[in-house]
Amino acid sequence: MQDFAGTFAHSVGLILSGDAELWAVVLLSLKVSLLAVFASAVIGLPLGALLAVGRFRGRQAVIVLVNALMGLPPVVVGLSVYMILSNSGPLGVLQLLYTPTAMIIAQTILVAPIIAALTRELLEGLNNEYAEQLRSFGVSRMGVVATLLWDGRYGLSTALLAGFGRAIAEVGAVIIVGGNINHVTRVMTTTIALETSRGNLALAMALGVLLILLAIMVNASVAALGMSGRAAANV
Amino acid sequence: MSDRGAPLPVTVNDLTYRVGGQVLLDIPSLEISQAWPTMILGPNGAGKSLLLRLLHGLIAPTSGTIRFNGQMAGGAVGRRQAMVFQKPVLLRRTVAANVNYALKVHDVARAERKGRISALLEQGGLSDHAGQPARTLSGGEQQRLAIVRALASDPDVLFLDEPTSSLDPSASLAIEDLIARAARGGAKVIMITHDLGLAQRLAGDIVFLHHGRVCEQTRAPEFFAHPKSHEAQAYLASKLVL
Ligand SMILES: Nc1ncnc2c1ncn2[C@@H]1O[C@H](COP(=O)(O)OP(=O)(O)OP(=O)(O)O)[C@@H](O)[C@H]1O
Ligand SMILES: [Mg+2]
């Protein structure tokens, strides 16, 4: 067992020296997770808004389903996406397995329900307050959705950040569908898992430090948004 | 008076509104004419706010019809109307943006909006608050904003649910003046109030509600001098004691 202080010093050295391998992994992580959050927002914001203002049959069932999907175990999502994308699976022809795209798909399945559920909850509260006034203005259904999304933007950004936090820290799904291939699908979490098992603790720890810093930044952004939101007396 | 064609009279027929088994409103017949501002009076819980929301088309009656000059309430008719709620609903935006929103949904061109916004804020005594988040305004300021925002669309019918309930005497007079001006400009004002002085000054006629029923509809001077119904007599007597 290497001594901890030595390993830590080495890992800080890796970060500060701009180690190419390390930063390639970090950049891929950011790229995959940001794209997954983007895709999840494209799906989750309208879906959440629809569930918040829509009055259709089966709405309650969809809400229960979306809430349940929030707690999906990542490895199960990984396995499902693996089976769908594998050569013998229904989408095997697309040849997406072991690509960053497969990882984005898996993370989107994990994050979209979170964003949809949080959006639904937030906008439903806002809609209860606004509904009659907007109807009095003669605003169309789409106009109502746009107004709610805009006036709920602080809370919604918090939902997006929560989704990003889940995506960037997730390992079970991306390791299955990405395969952890060097220079192709290796992201921060999967690299930590691999390098730790190989005994290359310095690289693992450097990535761990960066991951924690990212988590702190995400949480600080959430707090800052909350404050500016309240400062604008929006809540 | 008005050159936009009469949107009135309002004709109410066999109207009921029930929740659960409870009859909250029961109005066999009521006609409200274009001629003058109409005030709806009555004790707490009489059904005044419900009636206003029914007239504006925000809720549907359990049975019966409401027509504006023959057309059903709500829908296209509703778009030419505006309402100020008992509890003002302000958007999570600045004061100016709240007025801008109302102008925008009524298709006022962008170029025209800026001037209209400052004129309206001026009228509401809110010029100094243009950039302030609307929900940080004081209660009275919020009410004033809700009123000028309702006036922004230059409505045919203006529904007001106790618009002066939290205003100080001078703001109350200023708002009274705004309402009187809107009425002179051809808007039909249908207003709920507990301020009898205001009602006496502005009202053409009074609709008195009690327990979900219209007890009487009388010209204002007559109502205050000789209320016909027992309920209105009791209401006015207690008001005068207070
Ligand atoms: N959704 C509802 N379910 C049950 N009761 C209701 C509902 N909406 C209104 N009511 C009742 O109907 C009655 C009339 O309500 P409304 O708000 O019209 O009173 P109001 O005349 O405006 O009184 P106030 O002067 O206090 O504003 C009240 O007793 C109220 O509790
Ligand atoms: Mg009321």
Image (spheres, helix red, strand yellow):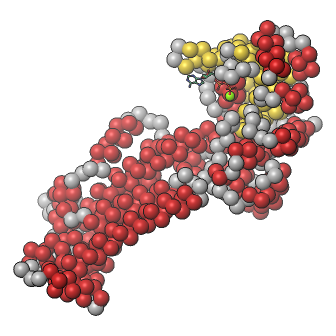
Q: Position of residue A123 (x, y in %)?
A: 49, 47
Assign the C terminus of chain B to one quadrant of the image: top right
Q: Is residue B145 above or below residue A1?
A: above
Q: Position of residue A20 (x, y in %)?
A: 26, 88
Q: Residue furthest left?
A: A1
Residue drawn at point x = 53 percent, y = 45 percent: A126
Q: Residue furthest front?
A: B241
Q: Is residue B210 left or right of residue A109?
A: right
Residue drawn at point x = 61 percent, y = 38 percent: A132
Q: Position of residue B2 (x, y in %)?
A: 90, 38
Q: Position of residue B167 (x, y in %)?
A: 77, 41
Residue nearer the viewer, A3 or A146: A3
Quarter occupied by residue A165: bottom left
Q: Is residue A205 above or below residue B134?
A: below
Residue nearer the viewer, A216 or A59: A216
Residue drawn at point x = 25 percent, y = 64 percent: A170
Does residue B81 appear in this view? no
Q: Quadrant of ligand 1?
A: top right
Quarter occupied by residue B5: top right
